[in-house]
Image (tube, rainbow, N blue to C red):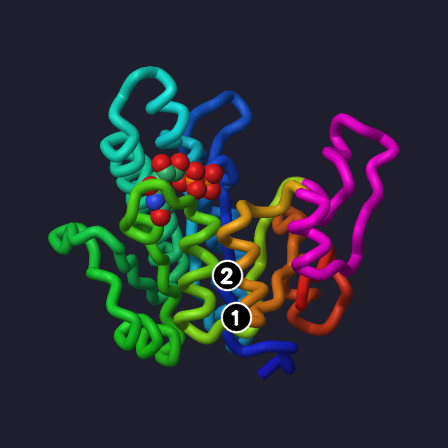
Amino acid sequence: MTKLICQRILLKLSGEALMSETGGSIDADIVKRLATEIKELCDAGLQIGLVIGGGNILRGAEKASEGLDRVTSDQMGMLATVINALAMQDALEAHGQQVRVMSALKINQVCEDYIRRRAVRHLEKGRVVIFAAGTGNPFFTTDSAASLRAIEINAELMIKATKVKGVYSADPQKDKNAKFYPRLTYDEALDQRLNVMDTTALVLCRDNNVPMRVMNIFEKGAVMRLMMGEEIGSLIQR
Ligand code: UDP
């Protein structure tokens, strides 16, 4: 088996990562492509916990700004993450990969409830665990949920998937002078308000010493190369 730099990771994908270019909320080909990459990583022996956001379907804060109750709209957002998790579960199973969706909200006719010990057991058995419904609480994001689950499952690394190479001083798609940071500390990311993840997520990772790799996972094979020791994207640590 290939020698990897770590055994267990938490991969955070935003909901938008599943969107089609024409605006469809879930693009089957994109989900399939991501599932292929995840399956390859599992075959190499990596244990993978996955958190997928819900922003391709609904974001609570946006709905609340249109007049919906914030708690209700966040609950709608959490359910959106369950929809994405089921799409990914299906694609992974189609590739012959064992997978379990575990939800922070109880909907156990659809998926398992999130129980930490059971999640760790699934991972040990080589199953991908998709953590759905965020933290189960309104006023949080799936970035915070990803940090929380990474800590709970003792992930050695959290990977935050982005469309760009890693962390920049400004949006590189808008500012051509944006500076790329190959390595930085959590405090630097927080002090400079770099647009990586929300503050709660960064503080959770910093205080619990979980390193984070911010990288473009849409580059084919990039996560595998990272796992084999290549420096890819930006590394944030304490
Ligand atoms: N959400 C929530 N609590 C959580 C995680 C998510 O209420 O612990 C809701 C919130 O409304 C959020 C939505 O679910 O806007 C979708 O998640 P997020 O915006 O983090 O998705 P992403 O931007 O990663 O696609």
Magenta span includes 28: no
User: Can residue 28 be seen?
Assistant: no
Q: Which residue is mark 2?
A: 204
Q: Residue at x 45, y 69 (%)?
A: 151
Q: Specify whether 121 is left or right of 41.
A: left
Do the CB atoms of the residues marked 1 and 2 lie less than 8 Å apart? yes
Q: Residue at x 59, y 77 (%)?
A: 6
Q: Residue at x 73, y 73 (%)?
A: 229
Q: Specify whether 112 is left or right of 225.
A: left
At which x and y percent is residue 148? 42, 61
Q: Which residue is mark 1?
A: 208
At which x and y percent is residue 63? 34, 23
Closer-to-camera residue (81/191): 191
Q: Which region is colored magenta?
A: 164-193
At which x and y percent is residue 223? 63, 61
In the image, farthest residue toward the front: 191
Badge 2 amino acid: Leu
